[in-house]
Image (cartoon, rainbow, N blue to C red):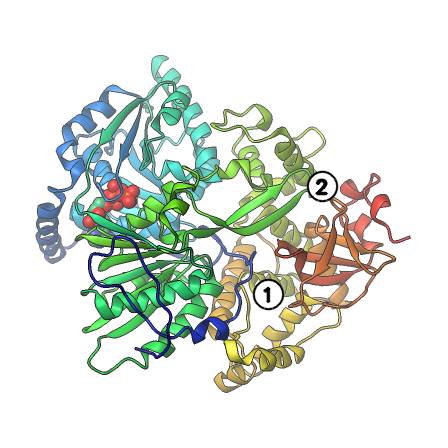
Amino acid sequence: MAPGAKVVHFSNEDDDQFIIHDNKHASKRRRVQNGVHEREADQPNDRLESSRPKAPTQKQEKDLQRRKQELFEFRKNLPVFTARDQIIKGVQENETVVIVGETGSGKTTQIPQFLLECGIGSPGRGAIAVTQPRRVAATSLAKRVAEEVGTTLGYRVGYTVRFDDTSSQHTMIKYLTDGMLLRELLSDKLLLRYSVVMLDEAHERTLRTDMLFGMVKEIQQTRKEMVQRGEKNVCELKIVVMSATLDAEKFSEYFNGARIMYVSGRLFPVKVYNTIEPQSDYLDAALVTIFQIHMRRPKGDILVFLTGQEEIETLTALLTEYAGQLPSNVQALLPCPLFAALPPAQQQKVFEPAPHNTRKVVLATNIAETSITISGIRYVIDCGVAKVRGFNAKIGVESLLVHPISKSSARQRMGRAGREAAGFCYRLYTEPSFGSLEENTIPEIKRCNLAAAVLNLKAAGVNDVLHFDYMDRPSRTSLSRALEQLYSLSAIDDKGTLTQEGNQMAEFPLDPVFSKVLIQSQQYECTSEVISIISLLSVDSVFFTPPDKRDNVAEAKKRFVHPDGDHLTLLNVLKSYWEVKGDKEWCRENFINMRNIKIVLDVRNQLIQFCTRMGIVSSTSAGNETDNILKSFLSGFFQNTALLQPDGTYKSVVGGQTISIHPGSSMFGKRVEAIMYNELVFTTKQYVRGVSTVQGAWLPMAAPKYFGNSKLASTTTT
Ligand SMILES: Nc1ncnc2c1ncn2[C@@H]1O[C@H](COP(=O)(O)OP(=O)(O)OP(=O)(O)O)[C@@H](O)[C@H]1O
């Protein structure tokens, strides 16, 4: 163990206190910034691949059956198994059922199988769709359930996540992200291929799940009426809402008094520890706790919840460094990162068993919070916070800030241990702090920019979005903002009807703002550059910043600076990387984060493939390349602009806020007539990041519908 004096004391410790020494790393590591962009499920890093599975061969069949039998012995003991008959009866007798059960009780893996076994899901009636808020959960669940059912993945059990469809016409249980079910709705408006839609992790209340609630409820009613009219080839749609919280009445009320069923118990206990003192630096506390567990606790892998990629990479580096100093008689430590922007193949690595005599430490964002089982995990470390997306509809400003999690999130995190054996959960906050957490997370629909959601609803045929049947109605201001933004982007016309361009934008696997930029780049003949920059913006940073080399990194960054700002500076990095053909030594000298560049190239390839399919030609800029690129971005980001004021500050065009350029931007300290930025971050003040210079005269051209009124008058420089 490293020398020093740092200790984290936990309550409920039944043996001597854990002690870990040395907190030098706290000063060594880079401070974690708020507001770093973390991409979520269904973002374009998803791989384009599609397999069309065939029925298993005889030899495969034998192996599958053996494994199925093995797993059956385990399944029998899951708490939901004892409630099998009641659950089947409940679903048979009711249109909608709300099922509440503890984490790990078997809801997600078992209930779809019950419904298949009893014929509610069948080739004649339709398949069973099980939605998940996150792709990593959808893919890993499908793999597990395929084994339990005794079929090859993609045959009777499969998954569909963006750019990766492992399902076939034989698939009867399909795990899919909520975003993918929304997408399927565009081509199958009544979801006729399904007899049951199971909305899992309903308590998470993601924007997409909330949209699905309203849509499946309406579809259920329409299909019921069709059946009553005697229409052929239609059956009623069953809805099963699954949740781990006790807030079931609200779901039941929304679904016309749906039957609520409770499944009690869990298979293995999880012992919870809270810190005795509040921790001022949770990253530091997490590192100390990892080593405390490693040195004092029996075998078992560790899962640590952090807020984003940057923290995960910092902790991975520190863990690797300190693990290298462990005595040779102590087992090795293997850090495994897990975050949304990581390519799927790398995400899958966390599910692989640790090598012999090695303890795996999975460092994850909250993408590991619900639904997934990572084999081997016995210990969970919960930092108690997460990055939360917010939107101030009044001033139209988005934010991504670190906030305390809710009690229900804390329970989900705890539930990732104790799935295969008894587990332990170390909360890096005190018991009273836990007590003061909100019971549930505020639904995303109440706190997000709704432009993408409204675009989706319109594309699915819901024209009157103000009167849509929301479970929690978003504010009128939020909806009006979204409509205004879509109108400014020319996605809808002045009657609120989707335009042809809006339809095209809904097809893109991107936020409407980025879709607009891409579509517009054709006109400016710079699609290729714009695709590269969008891909570069999809990662936190293309630079790697070792904590003790910050000055060297700053020097290295200067080599790529473009006078017009961060967008073109980023492009310079990629161009230079290509010039040296990704030379490793060059990357090392210039502090280029090779893993992130690989992610960028992956996203770029997928966007190119997507644009090709959409008929958008990947042209290269003619004329003034710089202006063309910036004008393309401005066509989407016109609301993220600010004008220089006589006193040298910048005032945002939307909301009239005083904003400052982030010190990490190549535009820091510069005074130009107008700037465009990628994101606004609240830390000590309102900082903008991803900043480039634009000309004030471009603004009315970029969004004539938006700037046609007096928007610019109140923020002009003189
Ligand atoms: N991929 C897997 N590998 C090993 N065991 C698994 C896997 N998936 C599920 N299990 C086992 O099945 C149990 C039930 O998992 P399931 O996901 O159905 O629970 P759940 O009630 O939906 O809980 P949660 O809401 O936490 O996901 C787990 O506790 C675990 O023991």
- Taking the spot 31% from the left edge, 62% from the top edge, the residue there is 350
Q: Is residue 152 visible?
A: no
**What amino acid is found at the position of numbered circle 1 in the picture?**
Ser
The residue that disc 2 covers is 488
Whether residue 631 is situated above or below residue 506 in the rendered picture: below
Choose the circle earlier in sequence order: 1 or 2.
2
Q: Nearer the viewer, residue 304 or 473?
A: 304
Is label 1 within 8 A of ligand 1 (CB to nearest ligand atom)?
no
Label of residue 532 in the image: 1
Q: Secondary structure at mark 2?
A: helix
Occupied quadrant, residue 86: top left
How many labels, in total?
2
Does residue 216 appear in the picture of this structure? yes
Residue 666 located left or right of residue 329: right
- In the rendered image, the quadrant that contains the N terminus is bottom left
Residue 691 is marked as none
Image spot of residue 181 (x, y percent): 41, 39
Q: Amino acid at mark 2?
A: Ser
Q: Residues within 10 Å of mark 2 (few under 14, many from 20)?
A: many
Residue at screen point 54% across, 85% down: 589
From mark 1 to mark 2, how far is it between C-alphas?
25 Å
Q: Label 1: state its secondary structure.
A: helix
Q: Residues within 10 Å of mark 1 (few under 14, many from 20)?
A: many
Q: Nearer the viewer, residue 682 or 445?
A: 682
Residue 109's image quarter?
top left
Image: 416 above or below 453: below
Q: Residue 524 in the image: x percent, y percent?
A: 73, 59
In the image: residue 582, left or right of residue 557: left
CB under 8 Å between discs 1 and 2: no
